[in-house]
Amino acid sequence: MNYSSYIALIPLLPLAAFVLLGLFGRKYFNRSAGIIATLLLLVAAGLSLYTAYQYFFVNGKVGDAYQSITAVKFTWLTFSENVSIDMGILLDPISVMMLVVVTFVSLMVHIFSLGYMKGEERFATYYAFLGLFTFSMLGLVVSSNLFQIYMFWELVGASSYLLIGYYFQKPSAVAASKKAFIVTRFADLGFLIGILILAFYGESLDFNTIIHNLTTQQSSQFLAITSASFIGVSALTWGLVMVFMGGAGKSAMFPLHIWLPDAMEGPTPVSALIHAATMVVAGVFLVARLFPVFSINADALSVVTIIGVTSALFAAIIACTQTDIKRVLAYSTMSQIGYMMFALGVSGYGGENGLGYTASMFHLFTHAFFKSLLFLGAGAVIHLVHSNEMKDMGGLRKLMPITHISFLIACLAIAGIWPFAGFFSKEEILLAAYNKSMVVYVIALVTSGLTAFYMFRLYFSIFWNKEAAVHDHHHGEGTFSMKLPLILLAVCSVAAGFIHFGNYVSSDGTALASAFHLSFAAAPLALGIGGILLAMWLYKTANDKPERLATALGGLYKAAYKKFYIDELYLFITKKLVFNLIGRPAAWIDKNIIDGLMNGIAAATGWISNLIKTLQSGKVQNYLLYFFGGIAALVIIFIYIWKP
Amino acid sequence: MSDIPISHILFVSTALFFIGMYGLFTRRNMITMLMAIELILNSVNINFVVFNKYLYPDKLDGIFFTIFIVTIAAAEAAVAIAIIINLYRSHKSIDVEDATDMKY
């Protein structure tokens, strides 16, 4: 059970890349930046795989159950004897799994960017930001306490902001980065309140201590948090819902999802890393991290379920109508994260009840591979076509065979077709939903069909449909460094499903026998194939069926195309209500009262100075006169007038 | 010497003080003004010595003060003359009326 501190190197290596490239990159390593960062990350990825091997196969298990191990721990800030903030590395099945996912996907993105970002002026800066992001994300997943996770949570948000706004010359990218930052920051307000509530009642910041304190039915902390209430809802529910609000913001759950589609303004590999595979699942990870506490509170779990299932369906419908390929992928990400969320929501703690938990983590794991593959494939397509719009693409299958095949694999995986990875994880989620609630199950099933439809709409529009428009395809499919990640991720997207995930990751650490029934798989599989066939019928060749269908659906199509007017609603609330009712009076007070006071003081000072400036005549003898006159006056006052 | 009443000597020192004052206010030549300042300082010196002699004949504090003032006056004269020379170099004049660059 001895974990040496090499684990600390995993997050520290990307940090080293960030510091090195951030400080000296542009001057000294603008060309070699990519290689340096990739090599450092390669070492980190190797170390995480080794850690995973050690944890899962050598010494993570005590008896039946995987233990949660604190590998590194030191006190960072001490406020008083009882209150201190630690920094640590916590190893348990989900954090080890996330280590592997984050370093692997990040490595793929690093390699892909070698080709994709080649010739960018701020090449080194790009890799520095990637390093910062990877460091923050790794720090987040191994956090041993709430405060540490909050710190890395914000760091992740900041690096996401930097990367979305990478093309800062584009006003839309700047607006998107601001939007992402503000929306997630607003959600983090809830997260902070949640942390304070949980830490106050749980009397600790440490995950293991909090979970122990708040789940033991007889403990004084448990009694305190369940008996305290605010507007008729117990403090425990408030704390968990607030924490979930932070998670929902980061994971782009309805109604805090508005930043994610716009975040696609960043470079495409960044979208693959941050806005598909790693950062956006931080919310799911957070709920999973605190899952023992969530599982004893049915109200908080139902909030998670409702938000998750709403987001899944809502995003899937919007994804069917979008024409920007990255936006389709963004909405599909949101939909899949919705899946993970409600899988947690319908889960229980321990034993067979914990199926939803395992399924959620499993889906997170497989989704990371096929979604980053989809984004990288989209990146390769955009690299070739120089456009994000579907109408500019079509017939690319002959021009880019490797991208075509890997994209097809990823689409099959996300559509949940056997034997690709998505099939297995989605089956588990559906099963967990089926066991818990019929409504959730039906919605999930419909969403699954929609997923297959919009993914293959995307696939056929890019690679089939019309013949390839022959314009300057001077660089072909891209460099080897762009193909390699596609191939590796495609292999993972096929293979990841065959891992018996329940053996390794479950809510209480003990192995979970995955119950898999062929008959149960029939419905989702049929819907998935149905969706694919529909997409094929509509989009395989260029025709007017899609337009006719869109016209037939009329208002519904338009609403979905306009993303159900959520952005407009936000704009109405912020611009019309908040700005006019709060912003304008505040601005008036600031301009007229606060500034007025300051300006008044300045004006008075100036006026008085003007009055007395003539005293400064520059004539020494005048000054002498004032001086002696003053002394004489003082003498007269003290001798004749001042009689104490 | 003790026949001379203290008021006589104080009269001399007061007269000296006001002569110095008058010089300081009316003269425009800086050297003359410096000389006037010396007069004022010397009137103070006389006061110190006289009060020491008439009121506390056993002590030497007043004498010490006088010696200090003489020393400092010498240093002050050196500094003042240095300033005046510099002023002369830049303004070609040692008239205080001409040195009005520092006004508002």
Image (spheres, grey):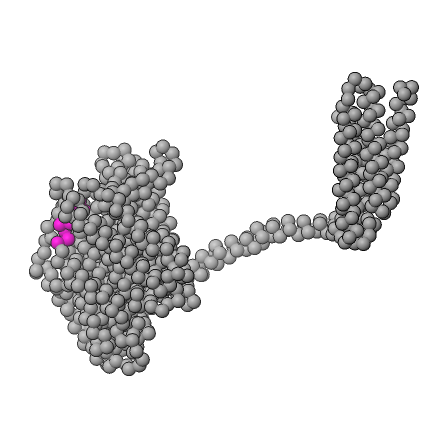
Which quarter of the picture shows residue B24?
top right
Q: Magenta span has A506?
A: yes
> Which residue occupies 45% across, 61% down?
A576
* Quadrant the N terminus of chain B occupies: top right
Q: Is residue B81 left or right of residue A506?
A: right
Asked whether residue A632 appears in the rendered view, the answer is: yes
| A118 lies above or below A289 | below
- Would you say the magenta stretch is mainly helix, strand or loop? loop
Q: Magenta span has B11?
A: no
Which residue is more in the foreground, A2 or A317?
Answer: A2
Q: Which residues are magenta?
A: A500-509
Q: Is residue A122 left or right of residue B48?
A: left
> Which residue occupies 87% across, 30% down?
B13
Residue A480 at x, y percent in the picture = 24, 69
Residue A521 at x, y percent in the picture = 11, 61
Residue A59 at x, y percent in the picture = 16, 44
Check the image and name the residue furthest to the top.
B58
Which residue is more in the foreground, A236 or A352?
Answer: A352
> Which residue occupies 54% across, 53% down?
A590
Check the image and name the residue furthest to the left.
A518
Asked whether residue A415 appears in the rendered view, the answer is: no
| A157 lies above or below A628 | below
Q: Is residue A360 left or right of residue A196?
A: left
> Which residue occupies 15% across, 70% down?
A530
Residue B17 at x, y percent in the picture = 86, 34
Which quarter of the picture shows residue A228?
top left
Q: Is residue A16 left or right of residue A631?
A: left
